[in-house]
Image (cartoon, rainbow, N blue to C red):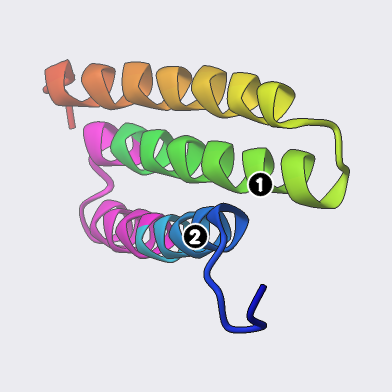
Amino acid sequence: MSPYEITTTTLIIGFKTLTLVLGGLITYLAYRAYRRTRSRSLGALTLGFGIVTLGTFLAGIVDQVLDAGFQLGLLIESALIALGFLIIVYSLYTTRV
């Protein structure tokens, strides 16, 4: 095996890192919009994106750092992403300021 060979684990870590960076940026921009407008729906949107991003981060920590296994990491990621999307859907239906 070449030291420069790209493995599945390397690709997963790379894509998880990219997802974390992009999710963090989206969460930050949503938070700035919330601070500017104080809109309840933007606050919920910020929370939803933050939870989705946290799910991706925690899944990687559980799998790679804690070595608790891929399935547990996937379970945590799926649960937090579902919760985050539920909050995002709520934010899209909330019209009060």
Seen in the picture, residue 46 relative to 17 is either above or below; the reply is above
Residue placed under numbered mark 2 in the picture: 11
User: What stretch of residues is rendered in magenta?
Assistant: 23-43
Determine the residue positioned at 30% across, 37% down. Answer: 45
Seen in the picture, residue 89 relative to 3 is either above or below; the reply is above
Res 44 label:
none
Q: Is residue 89 covered in magenta?
A: no
Seen in the picture, residue 84 relative to 2 is either above or below; the reply is above
The Cα atoms of the two marked residues, 1 and 2, are separated by: 12 Å
Determine the residue positioned at 18% across, 20% down. Answer: 94
Q: Main secondary structure of the magenta part?
A: helix
In the image, is 65 to the left or to the right of 22? Answer: right
- Crowd band around label 2 with a 10 angstrom C-alpha radius: few (<14), some (14–19), many (20+): few
Determine the residue positioned at 36% across, 22% down. Answer: 87
Which quadrant is the N terminus positioned in? Answer: bottom right
Local secondary structure at mark 1: helix
Which quarter of the picture shows residue 24? bottom left
Cβ atoms at labels 1 and 2 below 8 Å apart: no
Amino acid type, label 2: Leu
Which quadrant is the C terminus positioned in? Answer: top left
Res 60 label:
1
Amino acid type, label 1: Gly
- Position in image of residue 26 (x %, y %): 30, 57
In the image, is 44 to the left or to the right of 9? Answer: left
Local secondary structure at mark 2: helix
Which badge, 1 or 2, is on the more N-terminal residue? 2
- Position in image of residue 66 (x %, y %): 88, 44
